[in-house]
Amino acid sequence: MVSLTGPLYRLYAWRLARRIRRGPVPSHVGIILDGNRRYARERGLADLDLAYGIGADKLDEVLAWCVELGIPTLSLWVLSTENLRRPPDEVSGILAAVEAKLGRLAQDGRIRRHAVRVRALGKLELLPDSTLAVIRAAETATAKHQGMTLLIAVAYGGREEIADAVREMLRDKLKQGEEVPALIDTITQEEIARHLYAPDVPDPDLIIRTSGEIRLSGFMLWQSAYSEFYFCDAHWPAFRQVDFLRAVRAYQQRQRRFGR
């Protein structure tokens, strides 16, 4: 068995990355971070917060992999609206990991060096004030960066995003003086898309889900209509560079038709 840190593994990852750089890379990769709890159980970790901490630190590696391949946009689904209904101790552990990681990111020299802009999307009003403050600080500290975009989906649900977009669109139309009956003909795909949480961000080309689950669970439902999907068995804290590279290689091997 090849060691995951040995020279053969590093050589394989290097050769795979070199081969991938010769082809088209996705402009936007989304990752559904799944498997923290299963990772903890399989490794006998009594403290689930340890798994969340390891998962949070994985962000640094994935960012580096994206920079290496020249992928300009990365979205990470950290916490769903459904996750907020988990036991309070578990939710607080997730949020503590998010706060710690985003707090460090805002001061990280690599973020400045690669001009990574951090943005959050979701029903942020559902978050504790402490979490929201850290998110806003990270967004403010990186607001002028134009090298790469890192989207953190927290308290996020795809159905909620679409519902929020429709509500916001209707509010805007009513403010413009349009009558309710006339609104019916103004509801278009383009209008809804303009009111999503991050309307200026391109739709994801590739969506990766870790931990072997073969479903989206609501991640970017509107934006993923023509995305390519890759499902990886590794739990998020154990997600390796070769797992990421294989996902991008699979993307390159597919013929995208965009519904045609």
Image: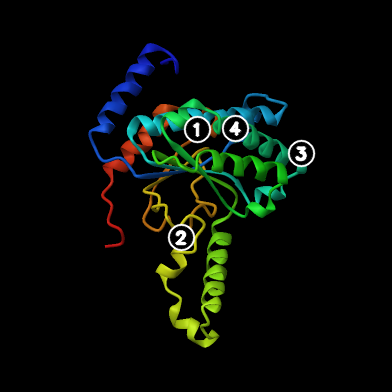
Mark-to-mark CA distance, 3 and 2: 32 Å
Q: Nearer the viewer, mark 3 or mark 1?
A: 3
Name the residue rendered at 75%, 44% in the picture.
87
Disc 4 residue crowd, few under 14, some 14–19, many 20+, Cα 10 Å: some
- Tag 1 or tag 2, which sits nearer the N-term? 2
Disc 3 residue crowd, few under 14, some 14–19, many 20+, Cα 10 Å: few
Disc 2 residue crowd, few under 14, some 14–19, many 20+, Cα 10 Å: some
Q: Does dot 2 land on a helix, a strand or a loop?
A: loop
- Tag 2 or tag 4, which sits nearer the N-term? 4
Name the residue rendered at 41%, 39% in the picture.
148
Identity, as a three-letter code, of the amino acid under mark 4: Lys
Query: Where 203 falls versus 1 (above or below)?
Result: below
Residue 37 visible, this orientation: no
Q: Nearer the viewer, mark 2 or mark 1?
A: 2
Name the residue rendered at 31%, 36% in the picture.
249
Q: Which residue is mark 3?
A: 89
Identity, as a three-letter code, of the amino acid under mark 1: Ala
Q: Nearer the viewer, mark 1 or mark 4?
A: 4
Q: Position of residue 197 (x, y in %)?
A: 52, 57
Q: Does dot 1 land on a helix, a strand or a loop?
A: loop
Q: Does dot 4 land on a helix, a strand or a loop?
A: helix
Q: Which residue is mark 2?
A: 222
Q: Which residue is mark 4?
A: 101
